Amino acid sequence: MIRLCSDLDRSKVLEYLNKDRALNLFFIGDINNYGFENDFQKIFIDEDGETIQTVYLVYYENLLISSYTKNIDQDFVKQLMEDYKIENINGEQSLIDTLDLSQCDNDDCYFCKMIKNPVSLDESVEVAKVEDVPEIIEIIKTVFHQDSPRMASSIEDKTGRTYFIKVDGKIVSVASSTAETDGLAMIVGVATLDEFRGQGYASKVVEKLCSDLLMEDKIPCLFYNNPAAGKIYHRIGFEDIGRWALRRNRK
């Protein structure tokens, strides 16, 4: 039976997700940071008696799915996509591969976590304030051709942070964290302007961001699908732990 969760289900849902904290980082971070009682986030569970089989989390236009038994209700997924105008479907790759998502583009990637501390830190790396966000968003748009509308709010409510490095007074490379929660944080939005690539700026920003997270006992995790980027992350101290599916709805 599939049902909508409330805060009364918090401990039960988190107990299920905590069986693989790294893999379920987005779930755990979003639940701890935003809870069950709001308009932009909904959590559903599919239960077999008292046992959770699957967790579905809607966060704005994103759908995340977790199921250790790969027990997904295809019709329910379609209903969620229609009801919440879902643009992105996320989850462990072998799980999402069980769905018929022919209407989606595939942007799957590697999932990794940091296993050793960064060894070199550059003190020129800065922590972004809200007033830095417009310039940083322009870099995100240039590199990824997408917006980052919730960056300012994540800085304000401390659910994430953004670091950057400047050259001649201009921000040229950035990296952010999101879904920060006890013991974990996700690194996202690592971007460098074309004319400044190949000079180590992204490495410096990520190293400083990860070092600060580790000082707060938060293990950084991240996704990548570019082999060149993967080599950089491995050198910094990350290790692949699986594959992550990101399917973008074309409709």
Image: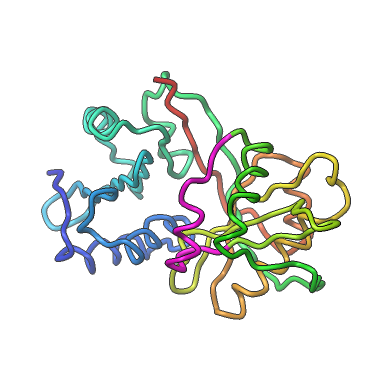
Judge whether residue 99 is colored magenta. Answer: no
Q: In which quarter of the image is residue 216?
A: bottom right
Between 116 and 177, the one nearer to me in the picture: 177
Q: Is residue 7 above or below residue 85?
A: below
Q: Is residue 59 above or below residue 208?
A: above
Counting the numbered discs, the total is 0
Question: On the rendered structure, is 75 left or right of 86?
Answer: left
Q: Quadrant of residue 8?
A: bottom left
Query: Residue visible at 41% across and 36% down?
Result: 89
Quarter in which the N terminus is drawn: top left
- Find residue 101 and report its horizontal and vertical position in percent: 40, 24
Judge whether residue 150 is colored magenta. Answer: yes
Q: Is residue 88 above or below residue 148?
A: above
Between 91 and 191, the one nearer to me in the picture: 191
Query: Residue visible at 78% across and 62% down?
Result: 204
Q: The magenta stretch spans which residues?
A: 146-161
- Find residue 150 and report its horizontal and vertical position in percent: 46, 51
- Find residue 121 and report its horizontal and vertical position in percent: 79, 72
Quarter in which the C terminus is drawn: top left
Question: On the rendered structure, is 131 left or right of 169?
Answer: left
- Find residue 43 and report its horizontal and vertical position in percent: 24, 51
Query: Residue visible at 34% across and 66% down?
Result: 32
Tell me the colour scheme of the image: rainbow
Between 161 and 42, the one nearer to me in the picture: 161
Between 51 and 106, the one nearer to me in the picture: 106
Question: On the rendered structure, is 21 left or right of 79?
Answer: right
